[in-house]
Image (cartoon, rainbow, N blue to C red):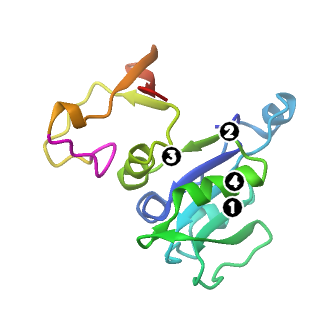
Amino acid sequence: RARAGALVTGVGTVIADDPRLTARLPQEEIDEGGLAAPVRVVLDSRGRTPAGAAVLNDAAAPTWLLQGEDVPDRHGGARVEHIAVPCDDGRVGLEAALALLARRGINEVQVESGPTLAGALLRAGLVDEVLLYVAPLLLGERGRPLFGGITPETMAGRIGLETVETRQVGTDLRLLLRPRGA
């Protein structure tokens, strides 16, 4: 996490999980490694981020709320910035959001989100790598998908991934994948 310029999530994840989105390293390790705490970015087209959300109330890193252009600033604080971005079909425009981050000097982002944002990014061709941890557990048919909105009807419609690296981490398997053609 500390190597990314920004940690990006959607408001659905903030509401469901209340993540802090921090580097998870002691500050001295960040300083010694020449790293900076990544900016936390929440995509929230309608201003639904709760006032008590951890990303708004923890001074570990600045938080940018990327919101629709007509959403009023509801959250104050020196470390919280409201940024209006164009929306596509009622959601923060993903290309506009990434372009804004690039203009602000952030060219590497790590997305930690639920299936809605993850699927939207993958469908839009905006994913360079997928870092996936697989635990030796099975969920039933009501388990949540990793990537929402991806429902190919045929093998020709599937999204292919290339395995770049695999590694055992405890009992989990860590996979580094790239979309084919990326």
How far apart are labels 2 and 1 at the CA level? Answer: 14 Å
Q: Kindly identify which residue carries mark 3.
A: 112
- Marks 1,4: beta carbons within 8 A: no
Tell me the chief SS of the magenta region. loop
Picture layout, residue 19 above or below residue 3: below
Magenta residues, start to end = 145-153
- Marks 2,3: beta carbons within 8 A: no
User: Can you say which quadrant of the picture contains the N terminus?
Assistant: top right
On the question of residue 124 being in view, the answer is: yes
Q: Residue 11: which disc?
A: none
Query: Residue flagged by tag 3: what amino acid is it?
Result: Glu
Q: Does the magenta-highlighted stretch encompass residue 150?
A: yes
How far apart are labels 2 and 4 at the CA level? Answer: 12 Å
Q: Secondary structure at mark 4?
A: helix
Q: Earlier in the sequence, mark 2 or mark 1?
A: 2
Q: Earlier in the sequence, mark 2 or mark 4?
A: 2
How far apart are labels 2 and 3 at the CA level? Answer: 12 Å
Q: Where is residue 168 drawn, in percent x and y?
A: 43, 14
Q: Kindly identify which residue carries mark 1.
A: 63
Name the one closer to the observer, 5 or 79: 5
Q: In front: mark 2 or mark 4?
A: 4
Residue at the spot x=62%, y=61% of the render? 55
Q: Where is residue 88 drawn, in percent x and y?
A: 46, 68
